[in-house]
């Protein structure tokens, strides 16, 4: 049994709302682990930029995502939930994606109902039919090797349809064996309250509007088990790298950057120096 997956299920079952760390690579996941985050979330958009230097269009593939997830779970003892896009194809493709991602050590796999854009800057290509998405979710659940792996049904229906139609989709997804619902495009508190009444499953949300991000009590009362608060760490990392390179390129003194650098002790913790020194002392023989 995976301890990380058991931990994730514990978070889902609690009555409170847990803040996840939005990570983008093994380094950020390692830091989240150091800070005792129980859950890490890897979004498709930042994963593509951080690891492939690509925008959030269909240029990355399932193997790219599997590689990043594997490197994260090897280095950080965290429960990793990730954006599995649309499962990278139809229901048969979803089966393979789930098996590969599960083998990479993830705890929860999101399968979304939004149709991937076929062109850059294409807006709102729509959602897969309810029947097709139900089949994909059922295939994802059946494909699991470890029953502790959580399949998360991600839906953008709240942003695409009238509320009653969106709720019917959510109810249908809740009957597939998926064990959590991820709400994308949540706009109001009334929507969240209606979703909570419509499904018994725990909910996860990213950057909810209407002041909800800081109202953890309201979120918990309406079924939200996991809150993802956007990707500020990723944006800050990009800006810091850009600023430091620009400073040096323009002739700035390297010494000027020292106050903004991580100190030696923090670097030592991040790269696990002491752990590897201990391994060396224990096993390396002269």
Image (tube, grey):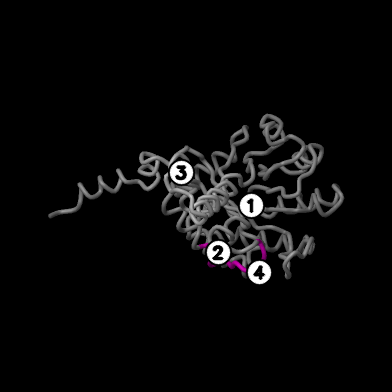
| Residue matched to label 4 | 89
Measure the alpha-carbon separation of dots 2 and 1: 25 Å
Q: Residue at x 84, y 53 (%)?
A: 161
Q: Residue at x 55, y 62 (%)?
A: 65
Quadrant showing the C terminus: bottom left
Mark earlier in primary sequence (2, 1): 2
Mark 3 to mark 2: distance in Å?
A: 30 Å
Is 215 covered by the magenta stretch?
no
Residue at image mark 2? 52
Residue placed most toward the observer, 47 or 179: 47
Other-residue count near label 3 (Cα within 10 Å), few / some / many at <14 / 14–19 / ≥20: few
Q: Which residues are magenta?
A: 56-66
Q: Position of residue 164 (x, y in %)?
A: 86, 48
Comparing 60 with 1, the one in front is: 60
Seen from the viewer's position, the closer of residues 285 and 141 is: 285
- Which callout, 2 or 1, points to the residue nearer the camera? 2
Q: Secondary structure at mark 3?
A: helix
User: Where residue 102 sits: x, y (%)?
Assistant: 51, 58
Assess whether mark 1 and mark 4 are in contact (beta carbons under 8 angstroms): no
Please tell me the numbered disc located at residue 256: 3
């Amino acid at each position: 049994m995976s301890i990380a997956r058991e931990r994730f299920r514990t978070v889902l079952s609690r009555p409170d709302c847990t803040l996840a760390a939005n990570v983008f690579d093994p380094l950020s996941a390692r830091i989240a682990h150091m800070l005792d985050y129980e859950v890490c979330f890897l979004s498709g958009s930042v994963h593509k930029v951080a690891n492939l230097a690509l925008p959030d269009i269909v240029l990355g593939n399932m193997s790219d995502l599997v590689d990043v997830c594997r490197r994260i779970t090897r280095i950080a003892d965290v429960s990793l939930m990730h954006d599995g896009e649309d499962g990278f194809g139809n229901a048969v493709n979803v089966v393979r994606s789930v098996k590969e991602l599960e083998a990479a050590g993830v705890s929860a796999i999101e399968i979304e109902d939004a149709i991937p854009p076929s062109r850059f800057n294409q807006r709102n290509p729509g959602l897969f039919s309810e029947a097709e998405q139900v089949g994909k979710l059922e295939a994802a659940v059946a494909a699991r090797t470890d029953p502790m792996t959580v399949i998360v049904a991600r839906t953008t229906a709240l942003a695409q349809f009238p509320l009653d139609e969106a709720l019917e989709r959510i109810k249908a997804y809740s009957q597939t064996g998926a064990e959590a619902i991820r709400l994308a495009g949540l706009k109001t508190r009334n929507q969240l309250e209606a979703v909570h009444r419509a499904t018994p499953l725990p909910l996860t949300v990213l950057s909810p509007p209407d002041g909800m991000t800081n109202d953890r009590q309201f979120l918990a009362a309406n079924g939200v088990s996991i809150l993802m608060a956007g990707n500020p760490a990723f944006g800050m990392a990009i800006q810091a790298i850009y600023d430091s390179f620009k400073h040096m390129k323009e002739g700035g003194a390297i010494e000027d950057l020292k106050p903004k650098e991580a100190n030696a002790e923090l670097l030592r913790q991040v790269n696990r120096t002491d752990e590897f020194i201990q391994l060396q002392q224990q096993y390396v023989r002269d």
